[in-house]
Amino acid sequence: MLWTAPIWSLLTGGVLGHNQHVFTLASTGADASPIIPGANLATAANLSAVNADAYSLLMHPSFPGHRMRIKKSAFCDPTVNAYTGYLDVDYGAKHMFFYFFESRRDPTKDDVMMWINGGPGCSSASGLLMELGPCSLDLEEISSNGTVWNPYSWNTEANVFFLDQPVGVGFSYADYEETVETTEGAAKNVHAFISLFFDTFPEFVGRRLHLSGESYAGRYLPAFASYIVDQNELAVAQGRRPANLTSVIIGNGITDISTLYPGRYEVECGTAALEVPFQKISTCVRMKIALPRCQDAIKRNCVEQLDMMNCDAAFSFCDAELSTAYWESGRNVYDISTTCEENVMCSKKNTLIKEYLDRPDIRQLLGVDPLFNFTVCSHDVGLGFHSHSDMRRVPSQHHVAALLERSIRVLIYAGTYDWQCNWVANKLWVDNLDWTGKAAYAVAEWHDWHVDGKKAGETKSAGLLRFVTVRGAGHMVPHDKPAESQAMVSRWLAHQEL
Ligand SMILES: *[C@@H]1O[C@H](CO)[C@@H](O)[C@H](O)[C@H]1NC(C)=O
Ligand SMILES: *[C@@H]1O[C@H](CO)[C@@H](O)[C@H](O)[C@H]1NC(C)=O
Ligand SMILES: *[C@@H]1O[C@H](CO)[C@@H](O)[C@H](O)[C@H]1NC(C)=O
Ligand SMILES: *[C@@H]1O[C@H](CO)[C@@H](O)[C@H](O)[C@H]1NC(C)=O
């Protein structure tokens, strides 16, 4: 099949202040029309034409109102080409920041992967600098530049993006305080970003794309991937090349809210995480009695039909009866084997990331717009999503099933020490998933998987779906078990058994 070649524009401009009209640089002067006149824009773009001194501006006629600013950067991984930039959306009113690292193996052939953190409202910089990025924040003060090399980075075998989304998160911002408050709203910007990127750089056209993320990404990614699949049909109809979306990878996600509490019960009062339950028997009995009521209330008021007021009441009941005791225990909600004080990922992570990314020299290296400070986790964005009951409104597992039916591979992994988006909750929804492979998955055998001869966890799969546990890891698996998580991703990308 033939695809019409995109009409291209690559223009180089200076670093833009946020008040400048972003499209004026693209036009020849007086005419600041966002629809770029074709005449001066027929240049084909490729990444090697992008340099570190100034942003290159990229536009595409299929996405009027969108523009990508990209520059090369010596940030984080000196062994590969690294880029940072913004996608300016909605005629320049919203700006989404990204980091892009080429693969350490073969950028010209390796797949492309996007990573996003959850929240909702948290920056993907925490994934980059604390989990799977090419460099990690230097917590031991052994490095002169603030970071240390991560040999287990996921760009070992893939070209990886880290996207700060939605606006208001990380270095992403809006000019007029516009907000994105739903996953469906966020999906449109993510799709535009991906389309622009793949249509922009001929070297990545048709390359396999994987969407990966953690935590609230269990809600984000099924919706983002579904939107991309649906938009792909439109692209094909219009003679454009679709994004080659191949897989979705979710770590300790929140996907089906109805399995959350039974999972937490097993983690606290069963042997799902620790060999001996840590919770008091009296508490466990109380939880056991409350559990069916909690599940029934969620089923009636949130799942079978959504009644916002009663659904909120159901969650209040469940939290009061099934979460209070955990919070009182003082244990870290992201890792039940530690307390928050002992665990740097709980106590200091956000402060350290912000301190590093707000350093003037680092901001300059990244080329971020001067007027906006970095936000690790935006309270306002979180509240916005909450006000739309974004987490409870859509049963995201249906998106996952629909993706599987359309040949998108799905990897669900979970660290077993997480309480928040625990592995049992994930196992339960994957077991219940209503798709054509359900029966095959039900009878598939569990087996251990190993890294360097040591057991890393258990796994089970059928067709395009794989479920993986990572033993002894908390919520942030790539931080807790870097070698294991990199091996898992490597085998997934290579279509190997675990
Ligand atoms: C990429 O752009 C550079 C500079 O414009 C050019 O020299 C090179 O041939 C281009 N490469 C490809 C693969 O188009
Ligand atoms: C920072 O320093 C460490 C050594 O301390 C080095 O391994 C790493 O590559 C450096 N990072 C950058 C971005 O230059
Ligand atoms: C997706 O990538 C695979 C592997 O490179 C390739 O075989 C396939 O044709 C691509 N599909 C599209 C639609 O580009
Ligand atoms: C950014 O942070 C600095 C230092 O904390 C502060 O002085 C400044 O007002 C902040 N800027 C914005 C736009 O919030």
Image: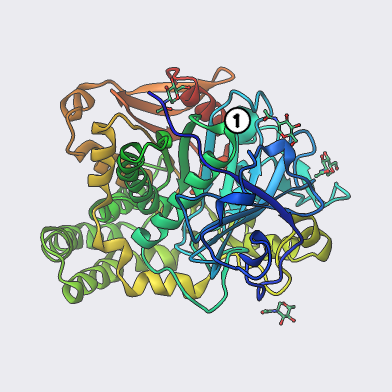
Q: Is residue 30 above or below residue 209?
A: below
Horizontal side of residue 262 vs 236, given as left or right:
left
What residue is pinned by disc 1?
Answer: 203
Which residue is the extreme one toward the front?
39
**Position in image of residue 109 (x %, y %):** 59, 23
| Residue at (53, 63) in percent of width and height | 34
Residue 490: quadrant of the picture = top right
Horizontal side of residue 414 vs 301, given as left or right:
right
**Position in image of residue 17 (x %, y %):** 71, 71
| Residue at (62, 66) in percent of width and height | 22
Name the foreground residue: 85 vs 10. Answer: 10
Q: Is residue 83 visible?
A: yes
Name the foreground residue: 440 vs 401. Answer: 401
Residue 270: quadrant of the picture = top left
The total number of labels drawn is 1
Mark 1 CB within 8 Å of ligand 1: yes
Q: Is residue 476 visible?
A: no
Looking at the rendered image, the quarter that the N terminus falls into is top left
**Position in image of residue 112 (x %, y %):** 54, 34
Q: Which quarter holds ligand 1?
A: top right
Q: Secondary structure at mark 1?
A: helix
Residue 303: quadrant of the picture = bottom left
Q: What colouring does the structure picture have?
A: rainbow
Q: Amino acid at mark 1?
A: Glu
Which residue is the extreme one toward the right?
144
